[in-house]
Amino acid sequence: MKHTMNIIRIQGTKKIPDYIQIRDENFTLIAYFRLNNPTRALTRCDLLDKKDEILAIASQLPYGEMRKLEF
């Protein structure tokens, strides 16, 4: 069974760093983390095994754009 999630890159400010959001198909927030420190958030939502794939997509994602993830 595939799970569909959405990934969004949020641009920070001088004091607030850029963040990544992962949301489920109902747009409920699943994970929220900085691109340089994803381990804890991905562990909590049981996506640590997909870390490399998520980071590859997130690092190329333009700010504010949403992309679907299917696992």
Image (tube, helix red, strand yellow):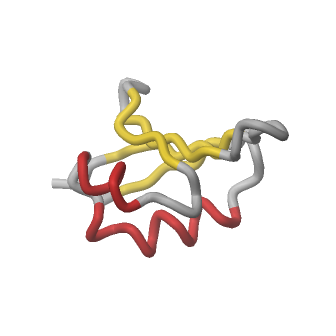
Residue extending farthest right: 14
| Vertical placement of residue 62 versus 11, above or below | below
Residue 58, position in %: x, y? 60, 60
| Vertical placement of residue 27 versus 30, above or below | above
Residue 2, position in %: x, y? 24, 54
**Between 45 and 27, which is closer to the camera in this rendering?**
45
Residue 56, position in %: x, y? 56, 72
**Position of 13 compared to 47: left or right?**
right
Displayed quadrant of residue 36: bottom right
Residue extending farthest front: 15
Residue 18, position in %: x, y? 69, 46
Please report the residue visible at 71 percent of the width from the left and 37 percent of the height from the top. Answer: 16
Please report the residue visible at 57 percent of the width from the left and 49 percent of the height from the top. Answer: 67
Please report the residue visible at 58 percent of the width from the left and 58 percent of the height from the top. Answer: 35
Classify the position of the C terminus by image quarter: bottom left
| Vertical placement of residue 2 versus 48, above or below | above
**Position of 28 compared to 54: left or right?**
left
